[in-house]
């Protein structure tokens, strides 16, 4: 394999390079997390610190032609969190801003 | 294996396990295995009014696959050690 300048050869490398950085994680059940990534494994089990969870609770309203129900957003913070890999949809590295 | 080791170092600490059915149980971590099955002692269900049937339960075994989150005591987690161990394991995986 040719070691490219970015050091990314396989998908997990993207997560490896995000260690100790704030990542965005999308989970099953309309949940999202941001937190500082400290550990992961091949199952995508994660350990995050300073994690903030956002839960989207969609409340379908009848009689609304736009098909737009109200979306309630619940947030909560957790100091140190283990996330089981089977619930993970995607892990996104921090935006470089 | 890495996460398994992390949990092993956290035995006898109080953790909060959130299950996929939204039940949250806090308890003292007594043991863990390779599937991340978890045994908890002196458990307390966070929302007792919603789960009154759990009030009498004092210890339990949780199948790893039903866990969504585990809230860990941050002061007992060495984040630098974790990151180094993760990089090491990632390097080992790449060699295979």
Image: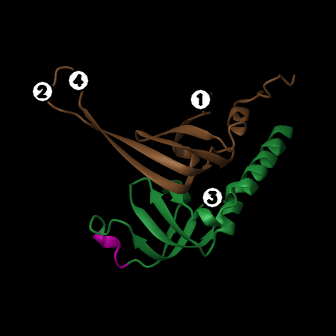
Q: How far apart are marks 2 and 3 (CA)?
A: 47 Å
**Quadrant assignment, res A1:** top right
Q: Where is residue B7 in the image (x, y as percent from the top left)?
A: 65, 64
Q: In the displayed structure, would residue A94 be above or below residue B46?
A: above
Which subunit holds the residue at mark 2?
A: A
Q: Which residue is drawn at 63% across and 43% down?
A: A44
Q: Name the residue under label 1.
A: A95
Q: Where is residue A7 in the image (x, y as percent from the top left)?
A: 80, 28
Query: Where's the N terminus of chain B, which quadrant?
Result: bottom right
Seen from the viewer's position, the closer of residues B94 and A4 is A4
In contact (CB < 8 Å): disc 1 and disc 4: no
Badge 1 and badge 4 in a common chain? yes
Pointer 1 local density, CA inside 10 Å: few below 14, some 14–19, many at least 20: few
Q: Which residue is drawn at 71% across and 62% down?
A: B5
From this viewpoint, is residue B68 visible?
A: no
Q: Position of residue A16 (x, y in %)?
A: 72, 39
Tell me the SS state at disc 2: loop
For the residues carrying marks 2 and 3, which lies nearer the camera in this image? 2
Q: Name the residue under label 4.
A: A67
Residue interval drawn in magenta: B52-56
- Give the drawing colour for chain A: brown
From this viewpoint, is residue A47 visible?
A: yes
Q: Which residue is drawn at 50% across and 43% down?
A: A33
For the residues carrying marks 3 and 1, which lies nearer the camera in this image? 1
Q: Name the residue under label 2.
A: A63
Q: Which residue is drawn at 18% across and 32% down?
A: A61
Seen from the viewer's position, the closer of residues B30 and A51 is A51
Q: Mark 3 points at which residue?
A: B35
Q: Distance between the residues labelled 1 and 4?
A: 32 Å
Query: Where's the C terminus of chain B, which quadrant?
Result: top right
């Amino acid at each position: 394999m040719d070691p490219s300048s970015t050091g990314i050869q396989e998908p997990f490398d993207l997560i490896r390079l995000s260690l100790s950085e704030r990542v965005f994680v999308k989970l099953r059940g309309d949940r999202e997390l941001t937190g500082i990534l400290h550990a992961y494994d091949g199952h995508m089990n994660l350990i995050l610190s300073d994690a903030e969870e956002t839960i989207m609770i969609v409340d379908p309203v009848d009689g609304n032609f736009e098909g737009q129900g109200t979306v309630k957003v619940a947030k909560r913070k957790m100091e140190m969190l283990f996330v089981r890999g089977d619930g993970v949809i995607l892990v996104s590295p921090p935006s470089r801003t | 294996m890495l996460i398994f080791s992390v949990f092993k170092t956290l035995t006898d600490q109080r953790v909060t396990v959130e299950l996929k059915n939204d039940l949250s149980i806090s308890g003292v971590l007594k043991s863990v295995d390779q599937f991340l099955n978890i045994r908890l002692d002196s458990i307390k269900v966070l929302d007792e009014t919603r789960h009154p049937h759990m009030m009498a339960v004092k210890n339990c075994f949780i199948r790893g696959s039903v866990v969504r989150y585990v809230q860990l005591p941050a002061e007992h987690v060495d984040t630098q050690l974790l990151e180094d161990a993760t990089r090491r394991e990632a390097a080992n995986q790449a060699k295979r």
